[in-house]
Amino acid sequence: MAAVAFVCAMMATFVLATTPSGRANNFGAYFADNGSHSRYYDAGFTAGARAATNWTIDYSYQPTDMYWYYTTTGIHSSNDIWYTVDPLPDPLAGLADCRALQDPDECEHWHVTYDEPWWIGAGDVARRSLACHETGHTVGLKHGPYGCMESGQFWNQYLGTHNRDHINSRY
Amino acid sequence: MPFVSRRLPLVVLAVVLGTLVGLVARSVISQPAAMGGREPGAHQVNAHASWKFHFDTSAAMLATADLAVEGTVTSISRGRILPGNSEVKQQLKEIRITTTKVWKGALEEESLVVEDAGWEISSAPGEGEMELVIADTVQPAPGDHGIFFLRRNQGTGRLSFINNQGVFLLRGGQVMDTPRSDPLVQRIERLSEPGIRQQLRGDLRLVKAGAVLPKRPA
């Protein structure tokens, strides 16, 4: 009887521990290292790319509790995000990669790249949506059915309240 | 009640052990399913990506694919380096697949090469070369057998996977379970090998009948 109780308790706990949380959570890939987020635009970052990125920062990320600012000093180790427009492997439209993982879950320096051929053919809404999506990855947001973090959509250019609440809970 | 109080330490011990074993198992399960395509010892950079296509159904994916094949990965090697404007350049991975069945499209040879994201080569101080590991993808390794949905680049004519959804590895009579979070992928990965083939046959009928149209890139 004791053995049965032991095995049952162990199995139940095993199942609970291996099952992802039922609470909707698309947060927690790699967080930013702190609540102050600097960005630098590469020399080849076009005027259109700057406009779309500034738009997403102004309308989606500035309203969060994080502090966002632009810097003209391009030093990889000190910029939180380095934005570029470059050709990416097919079929990528955008990429956010952590180039300096500080802790197991904190990234100190991100590269965000918009695929050049895709970018040239995209409209304003799609561009802003991509900028919002990739920037979201730099603060720890993962893909999910919320705002601009929904995978494969290029029509929602806003972060949305769900993602904003996650950011505000962390930073 | 006396039984519960006597057994309580045992149950607590079981809960603690169960949690530990569960957490270890969860961390193992969440590792990428196929690591063999990666170079051992290479520095890796963790990335998140946006894909030009996203599908809610396998029929839409089949309709949009230029080529859908079943086959075995025979080799993975370094490919061309994309031209770039910044300090970071992309070097592609070439995945050679020997096909056993062509589900959609035409193929002149039995073997084909798929280009995929591979390495980032940075000339920035202290960065160098890193292998790109994109979240929510599966990286086929030599020896892997699977079903691959492919798209041909309009400019170069080269093939790539249609997106992160379009790779299904077959192992032990089942579609292999990978850590991808996409709902369509998870639905398909619950199928058996005969199940996914049956699904494809049904999808193909819909595509040929014009009931499902190709998606255009965003």
Image (cartoon, coloured by chain):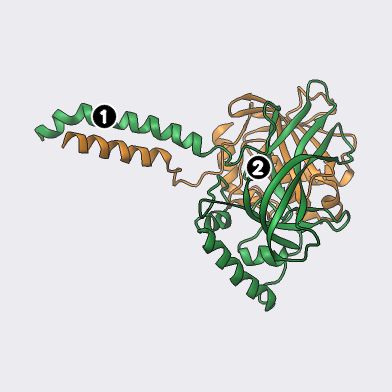
Name which residue lies at 37% across and 42% down. Answer: A15
Chain letter, disc 1 residue: B
Query: Amino acid under label 1?
Result: Val
Residue B75 percent across, percent down from the top left = 72, 43
Q: Quick one: B129 or B67, which is closer to the camera? A: B67
If the image is split into quadrants, where does the N terminus of chain A sit?
Answer: top left
Number of labelled discs?
A: 2
Spot the residue most to the top. Answer: B126
Residue A147 percent across, percent down from the top left = 63, 51
Look at the image and give the colour of chain A.
Answer: orange
Position of residue A138 relative to residue A73, above or below, is: below
Q: Quick one: A51 or B129, which is closer to the camera? A: B129
First in sequence, mark 1 or 2: give its number. Answer: 1
The local secondary structure at tag 1 comes to helix
User: Could you tell me if residue A59 is visible in this image?
Assistant: no
Q: Quick one: B208 or B86, which is closer to the camera? A: B208
Look at the image and give the colour of chain B.
Answer: green
Task: Name the residue tied to disc 1.
Answer: B12
Name which residue lies at 68% across and 26% down. Answer: B41
Q: Which mark is residue A58?
A: none
State left or right for residue B216 relative to residue B71.
Answer: right
The local secondary structure at tag 2 comes to loop
State left or right for residue B117 relative to residue B173.
Answer: right
Task: Name the residue tied to disc 2.
Answer: B141
Chain letter, disc 2 residue: B
Residue B130 percent across, percent down from the top left = 74, 30
Which quadrant holds residue B86? top right
Name which residue lies at 31% across and 41% down. Answer: A12
Query: Amino acid under label 2?
Result: Ala
Mark 1 or 2, which is nearer the eye? 2
